[in-house]
Amino acid sequence: MNQESYLKLISGQKSRLSDKILRSFLGGAAVFYSIAIWLRTSLYAKRLLRTHCAGAKVISIGNITVGGTGKTPLVIWLYKEITENSKLKTQNYKCAILTRGYKATQNSKLKTQNYTDEPAIFLQRCPQAKVIVNPDRVAAAAEAVDKFGAEVLIMDDGFQHRRLARDLDIVTIDATRPFGYGRLLPAGLLREPVTALARADAVVITRCDQTQEAELAELEQKLRQINSNMIIARSIHAPICAASAEGKKISLENLKGRKVFAFCGIGNPQAFLNTISMLGCELVGHRVYDDHHYYDSDDVASIYEQAMCSKAELILTTHKDWTKIALLGASGREMPLAYLAIELKFISGEDKLRDLIESTLAGKIPE
C-alpha cells in the first residue's frame, strides 16, 4: 500500500467493508503501540532509561506526527537566528546540525558521497554549518562537540529521541492536519499521544495560510489546555522563487498563469500542490510519490512523459525532491524543471520564540 492509499484509509475516505476491517486491525495494532510508548515514557520519567548530556546546548526541533510538518525550514531559520542574529552573532556560538538523514548510498545509481533530503538542503542553505548525519544522536552530538567544538546543537526531528538531553524542545505542527487524524500509529499519524506536548517549550504552527482562522484558534486553545506555559507561534512556508539547476530563477510573478506539472515525494503532498495553486499557476497534472522516495532514471522519464502529455510548460517539485532528481541529470531536457524555493516566515509569536532562544543560550552555554 502506497502513502496516498494509506492516508485515505486511515482518514476514513475509504469506506468499503474490507477497508473498515483493515482499520479495525490497525486500531488493534495502535493499542500495542500505545502501550510501548507509555512504557518508554514511564521509564524515562523514572530515569530507568538514561539520557546523555552533550556538553553543549541542545535545541530539538521535532513533531508528534509522521510526515512533513515543516521541521526543515524551522531548522534553517534557527541556525541563521543563532549565527546571524545581531544579538547572538556577537557571541560567536559554534553551531552544528544533527540529523538522522537519508544517504544517497541507499540508491545504487547515485554517487556514494552525495546526500539527499534534509542533509543536502541544510548544506545548501547553511553552507557554514557542520551537518552531522547519524541516526545515533548521542554519537552525533559527541562528534560535533569533540571534533568541531560545537557549543550549540540543533537536533532535527528530535522530540522522540529522548536519549539525548536537550535544553529546549520546539515542536512543529502542520495546521492542515495537526494531530494526525487523532490516532496513534498505525491507525493514525501520531507518534505519541497529543498529551506528550506537555514536554514542549514552544510550538510553531506551520502552513497557517492554508487553513481558517477559526481552526487555528481552536488548535491554539487545545494546545493551551495541554501546556499553558508553552510559547505558540504561527508561520507560513513562503515561496521565494522557482530555481533550476543552471541557477536560473523564475520570479513568483512570472509563475502566474504558467502551465505546471508538479511532482513530489514528501509527507504532506497536498500542501505543496495547494501552494502551487495559490501562486496562480495552472496545475495541469501532478504525480505523488511516497515520502523519501528515491528516484531513478525511469521515474525521471515517466515524469517528463506525463508533463509532455499534460502540455505543461514547466515541471515543478520541492527542494527536498530536487536534491535527488538533480543527481540523475534531470536538467537540460526539452522542458524546464525547477524546484520551489521556500522559507519560513512568522506571522505571530516570532519575538517570544526569539526571546526564549536567546535566554536559553545565555543561561546554558558553557564557558
Image (cartoon, rainbow, N blue to C red):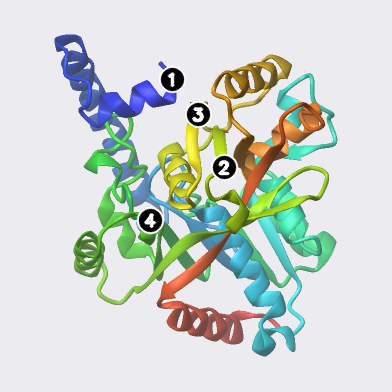
Measure the alpha-carbon separation of dots 3 and 4: 25 Å
State the residue position of label 3.
Answer: 286
Relative to residue 126, is residue 268 depicted above or below? above
Q: Earlier in the sequence, mark 3 or mark 2?
A: 2
Measure the alpha-carbon separation of dots 4 and 1: 23 Å
State the residue position of label 4.
Answer: 173
Amino acid found under the numbered disc labelled 2 = Arg
- Other-residue count near label 4 (Cα within 10 Å), few / some / many at <14 / 14–19 / ≥20: many
Relative to residue 361, is residue 208 depicted above or below? above
Considering the numbered disc 1 on the image, is that residue within a helix, a strand or a loop?
A: loop
Measure the alpha-carbon separation of dots 4 and 2: 31 Å
Task: Give the label on residue 2, or none.
Answer: 1
> Mark 4 near mark 1, Cβ–Cβ under 8 Å?
no
Amino acid found under the numbered disc labelled 4 = Ile
> Mark 2 near mark 1, Cβ–Cβ under 8 Å?
no
Task: Give the label on residue 258, or none.
Answer: 2
Quarter of the picture containing the C terminus is: bottom right
